[in-house]
Amino acid sequence: MTQTQTLTEARMREGVWEGVLASKLKPSVAVTHLEAQVPDVTVTVEGEGLWRIKVPVPAERLSDGVQTFVVHDTGTGDTIGSFAIAAGTALSQDLRAEVELLRAELDMLKRAFRRHCVESEA
């Protein structure tokens, strides 16, 4: 019998990723990064049918780019979910970085336009 499990990301704080898993039974989970198991993953009761998963992210697992961690059900081998951490200089090519640059340029143009309007009124 396959049970439905839904993993929701809760937060990342002080190097520990936390998620909440909706599951009728206490889950048995493992987290991997590049097919290597991440140690010290804990599962605690959060409420009826809810379980808090805490994953201390080892510093040696972080590097430039996007690092993806996969949460598995060890009983079935199914993937329950995943989370990603983005860091480093590789992000300069990231779309979010481009949007931030566009916003900064737009702010600069707005200031210049407003200054031009004030000067042309005088």
Image (tube, rainbow, N blue to C red):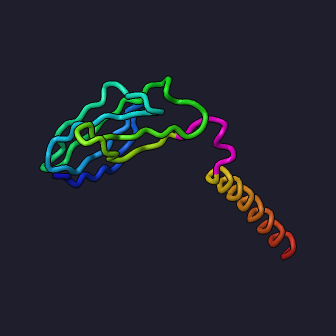
- Horizontal and vertical percent for residue 73? 27, 41
Instruction: Give me the residue at 31% from left, 25% from top.
Output: 40
- On the rendered structure, is 60 left or right of 120? left
Quadrant in the rendering for residue 31: top left
Q: Is residue 107 above or below residue 69?
A: below
Instruction: Give me the residue at 26% from left, 37% from top.
Output: 74
Instruction: Give me the residue at 38% from left, 28% from top.
Output: 37
Quadrant in the rendering for residue 12: top left
Image quadrant containing the C terminus: bottom right
Report how many numbered discs are placed on residues in the image.
0
Instruction: Give me the residue at 66% from left, 36% from top.
Output: 89
Q: Is residue 73 magenta?
A: no
What's drawn in magenta, residue-wise?
86-94
- On the rendered structure, is 48 left or right of 29? left
Q: Is residue 93 magenta?
A: yes
- Horizontal and vertical percent for residue 28? 22, 37
Q: Is residue 49 above or below residue 116?
A: above
Quadrant in the rendering for residue 53: top left
Viewer-proximal residue among 97 and 73:
73
Viewer-proximal residue among 111 and 29:
29
Viewer-proximal residue among 74 and 85:
74
Q: Is residue 25 above or below residue 106?
A: above
- Horizontal and vertical percent for residue 76? 25, 42
- On the rendered structure, is 39 left or right of 119? left
Residue that sits furthest to the bottom in the current view:
121
